[in-house]
Amino acid sequence: MKRVGVLFSGRGSNMAALLAAPGLEGRFVVAVSNREDAAGLRLAAAHGVKTVCVGHRGFADRAAHERAIQEALLAEGVEVVCLAGYMRRLTPFLVGEWTGRMLNIHPSLLPCFPGLDTHRRALEAGVKLHGCTVHLVTEEVDAGPILAQAAVPVLAGDDEATLAARVLRQEHVLYPTALRLFLEGRAGAADAAATLHNPLPGAAGAP
Ligand code: GRF
């Protein structure tokens, strides 16, 4: 059982999906927020997971803030980190500490639409397929090796809210699935890719 930590900043719905996932070869030992008002703090506590808030104000620089986060993770013996709506750009320090052991979920089919406002940009671009990606974190934002993706159709009449909601439903299935495979050493392998290609109810191409 790997010891897993989560970093988040807000609502925490992806974190809640991870915490509720059955059959993981891992145990969530700490959830760290950079915001005291993050709704996800209550969700994590409700799952019996230790919560730590490391506010980003008051530190000399980003790396100093990240050193405090790193201490919180190491204090719980964390071995794998999941970013779940963690809205601070990471410095090379924290990325370097977790190379190959830090996952992120991003609400687009990377490499399309890295960064913010993915749903608005997808609508503006007129793409017919959109979705979400779980990837390993590297120094370049949203550019690390892709572990899993789920696609959804963009429908006539969609606005940002309807598209975001359709993608979010897939995020809540994709992230636990990708983490499960990762913890089993199977993420990114051929069988994982086969398992995760549009298998999700409501995904484009799903029966
Ligand atoms: C999700 O859309 C996730 O893909 C992105 O930030 C959002 C976080 O939502 N990285 P939540 O806090 O998990 O509800």
Image: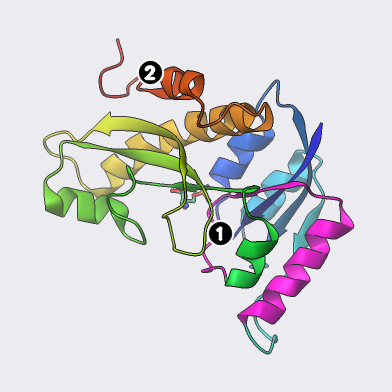
In which quadrant of the rendered view does residue 157 lie? top left
Q: Is residue 37 visible?
A: no
The residue carrying mark 1 has its beta carbon less than 8 Å from ligand 1: yes
Give SS at disc 2: loop
Percent x, y of residue 165: 36, 39
Q: Would you say residue 167 is visible in this rendering?
A: yes
Graded by Cα atoms within 10 Å as few (under 14), some (14 to 19) or many (20 or more), the crowding at tag 2 reads: few
- In the rendered image, residue 201, in percent from the top left (x then y), is placed at 38, 18
Q: Which residue is mark 2?
A: 201
Q: Is residue 70 above or below residue 156?
A: below
Q: Name which residue type carries label 1.
A: Tyr
Taking the spot 65% from the left edge, 29% from the top edge, the residue there is: 185
Q: Residue at x 63, y 51 (%)?
A: 40
Q: Quadrant of the N terminus?
A: top right
On the image, numbered disc 1 is attached to which residue? 86
Quadrant assignment, res 93: bottom right
Is 72 displayed left or right of 153 in the figure? Answer: right
Q: Which residues are magenta?
A: 62-90
Residue flagged by tag 2: what amino acid is it? Pro
Please indicate whether residue 86 sits to the left or right of residue 71 in the image: left
Element type at mark 1: loop
Most foreground residue, 125 or 79: 79
Cα distance, mark 1 to mark 2? 27 Å
Bin the neighbour count of mark 1 within 10 Å (Cα to Cα): few under 14, some 14-19, many 20 and up. many
Residue that protrudes farthest toward the front in the picture: 190
Q: In this image, 88 relative to 122: left or right? A: right
Q: Could you tell me which residue is drawn at 69 percent across and 54 percent down?
A: 41
From the top left corner, tell me how far across and down residue 21 is, in percent: 65, 27
Image side of residue 162 versus residue 60, left or right = left
Residue 122 drawn above or below residue 55 = above
